[in-house]
Image (cartoon, helix red, strand yellow):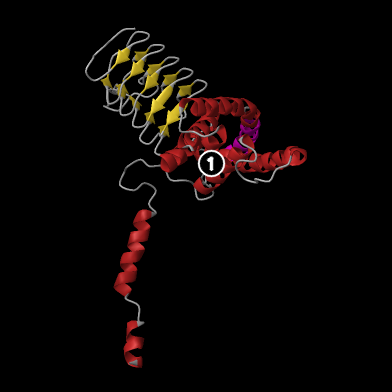
Amino acid sequence: MANGDEKAAVPDEGAEDDFSQLVGALCAPVNGGSGVKKPRRDQALPSRQSIGEIIEALRSVLFPGYFGFSELQEESLRFHLGAQLDQIRRSIQEQIKRGLCFACGEEQECLPECDQKARDLTGAFLRKLPGVQRKLALDVQASYEGDPAAASPDEVIFCYPGIVAITNYRLAHELHLLDVPIIPRMITEAAHSATGIDIHPGAVIGERFFIDHGTGIVIGATCIIGSRVRIYQGVTLGAKSFQLDEKGNPVRGIDRHPVVEDDVTIYSGATILGRVTIRRGSVIGGNVWLVHSVPPESRITQTRNLEAG
């Protein structure tokens, strides 16, 4: 038995060679000619885990007492938020710097510039938080008023996936406006994974936004959504087609998603594609497929193509 054990312990030189070749292939600068960028060896990429921790910390600052430390007292609130913000500042500055260094593609000489820029962007972002908090308070109120199943605004904050997704979006959108690379998309994709709600950070969304149920919602990068808009599960605000360049690649930066004006309701399963405009006060029924603009106060259903108000 001992002899058998000793024989099994002898390494297989052929297997080691194969494994070494596999590792070498995976470490090649470009795998398969795909053009996928690989980071420099001295460059740390943004961390998904750290970004998740930062967002949860920001959630506890935007909704103090609801998330994070739950036993806050009025006299300790200022101290608690100050300490939390200081930790957030250091953490998000590091992640922004990593994103900047990766995006700029330079070598070591880029690091001092990226470091200073990360400090400036972090300060600008943190100054946006009171405005984000005000918008989120209006979003919570809209969700409570729009859903008779909600027992209180507290329940909306604690339990509704729509508020989770909107919070991530509003934070990511501010970073997007500051031209922070990579990080905004990481933030909204974290909410997408958790809730099934996919909101691109480049979308522009007004106040008192209400997402009910939420699973399967897609809101594209160039969408513009007004105030007091309600959207139900399974709604897609997407692109109808992509303009291609001479090489057949999609042209970027073109407005290709819908504009939804104030006081519009879009019911579950509706799909609205292209740079069309849903005018103020319209109602889009469930499972409607829509690729044209509609006038104000319209009622669109599967059985009626267009009923103007």
Most prominent secondary structure in the magenta stretch? helix
Q: Quadrant of residue 15?
A: bottom left
Residue 117's quadrant in the figure?
Answer: top right
Q: Is residue 175 left or right of residue 18?
A: right
* Residue 84: % across, % down: 68, 42
Q: Which x, y percent locates residue 92?
A: 60, 40
The residue positioned 65% from the left and 46% from the top of the image is 69
- Residue 105 visible within the image: no
Q: Report x, y in % for residue 125.
A: 61, 30
Q: In the figure, 271 relative to 181: above or below? A: above
Mark yes or no: residue 277 visible: yes
Quadrant of the frame with the N terminus: bottom left
User: What span is in magenta?
Assistant: 109-123
Q: Which quarter of the image is occupied by the C terminus?
A: top left
Residue 112 on the magenta span:
yes
Q: Secondary structure at mark 1?
A: loop
Q: Which residue is mark 1?
A: 107
* In front of the other: 135 or 282: 282
